Image (tube, rainbow, N blue to C red):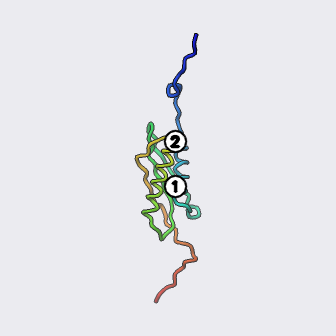
Amino acid sequence: MAAQVVEAAERGATRIADRVIAKIAARAAREALGTVPAGGAPHTTVEVHQNSARVRVTLELDYPGDLGAQCAAVRRRVAERVRTLAGMEVPEVTVHVERLHPASAGGARERIR
């Protein structure tokens, strides 16, 4: 009796836990920002439906800065990393800026009278 070859896709399924996708997304958000304010690590939640993940990132940013560009960079990086590492499509990355941190005290301004 000859051994039958079973295609890889027919042997089983791989399921990646939601918390793993959330960790990938949080790490990607940190990568996109470069530096994050002290205590301001990004928090993520995900909704996974079959081969698709919707991600919500809550973060804190330094101010002043280009908030729109920072949020766009986070959306791009999160979608790219989840797609690459987990093989899931990411139709939506929602970024919620929870708090702004003032720039370092080294750039303190004088009060003008």
Residue 71, by quadrant, is: bottom left
Give the number of the disc on residue 29: 1
Residue ID at (47%, 69%): 65
- Closest to the observer, 80 or 19: 80
Badge 2 marks a residue whose secondary structure is helix
Circle 2 residues within 10 Å: few <14, some 14–19, many ≥20: some
48 shown above or below 41: above
What type is the residue that disc 1 sits on?
Answer: Ala
> Which residue does the numbered mark 2 point to in the structure image?
86
**Residue drawn at 51 percent across, 44 percent down:** 84
Residue occupying image coordinates x 52% and y 30%: 13
Mark 1: give few (<14), some (14-19) or many (20+) Cα within 10 Å: many
Q: Residue at the far top: name it.
A: 1
Q: Is residue 1 above or below residue 60?
A: above
- The residue type indicated by label 2 comes to Ala
Horizontal and vertical percent for residue 31?
Answer: 54, 56
